[in-house]
Image: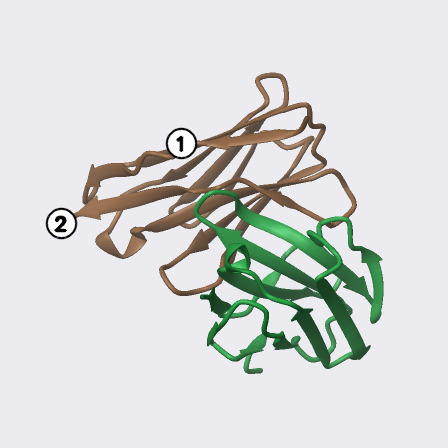
Amino acid sequence: DAGVIQSPRHEVTEMGQEVTLRCKPISGHNSLFWYRQTMMRGLELLIYFNNNVPIDDSGMPEDRFSAKMPNASFSTLKIQPSEPRDSAVYFCASLLGGNEQFFGPGTRLTVL
Amino acid sequence: SQKIEQNSEALNIQEGKTATLTCNYTNYSPAYLQWYRQDPGRGPVFLLLIRENEKEKRKERLKVTFDTTLKQSLFHITASQPADSATYLCALDGGSYIPTFGRGTSLIVHP
């Protein structure tokens, strides 16, 4: 298995633009997590899906952020409009029962 | 509020020595505590999990202890190697399978 796949790996955009981050979890995993990592705040959970259903989105910072999981093999995190303070590394992780999360390589987002 | 504290200063040690990293927490009753390793430009990688009723867990050169009275976990790497240099994150889970991560401690092992 290729592991969790994220795209793009790097994204540079201008303030006000829409940004879409993509994630393909490990096949068969039924839970998917989106995290944001910054030096100041560390690794923060944004949203958690179980069997494609959003279970906990309390970490989503504001209405500019939205996430979808239309099927078991694909999820998106969208920021519209983007702001410079959204600059961070965004990680997707998946798991199959248990506690061990498998993280993707992350998307480094820079909003100018 | 819940707080997880890991030393923000990098830990520098000599190759062959034992590295010990600390994770302290407050206002939390974790059912599980996990340790992850993160290399620059990569996502965290799971290393070990210890349950609240376990005192110690070992895996090869790694050892984790969990003291729910002190609200502390210690992570040890024996016979450390330069390849062990990375950031190590602890994560607490109250039983919901949704962990809360600490900010991590950087370990640098000098040859």
* Colour of the chain lettered B: brown
What residue appears at the point 59 percent right and 66 percent down from the top-left corner?
A82
Q: Residues within 10 Å of mark 2 (few under 14, many from 20)?
A: few
User: Which residue is disc 2 drawn over?
Assistant: B111
x and y percent of residue A12 in the render? 45, 74
Cα gap from disc 1 to disc 2, whole angstroms:
23 Å
Label 1: element kind? loop
In this view, which residue lies farthest toward the left?
B111
Q: Quadrant of the N terminus of chain B?
A: top right
Disc 2 is attached to a residue of which chain? Answer: B
Image position of B46 (left or right of B39): right
> Is residue B17 visible from the viewing direction of this image?
no
User: Which residue is disc 1 drawn over?
Assistant: B7
B81 or A24, nearer to the observer: A24
Q: Which amino acid does the dot numbered 2 rest on?
A: Pro
> Is residue B51 visible from the viewing direction of this image?
yes
Image position of A39 (left or right of A92): left
Using the image, determine if residue B15 lies above or below residue A28. above
What residue appears at the point 54 percent right and 69 percent down from the top-left corner?
A104
What residue appears at the point 62 percent right and 75 percent down from the top-left corner?
A18
Q: Residues within 10 Å of mark 1 (few under 14, many from 20)?
A: some
A98 or B57, nearer to the observer: A98
Using the image, determine if residue B86 lies above or below residue B9. below
In this view, which residue lies farthest toward the front?
A16
Disc 1 is attached to a residue of which chain? Answer: B
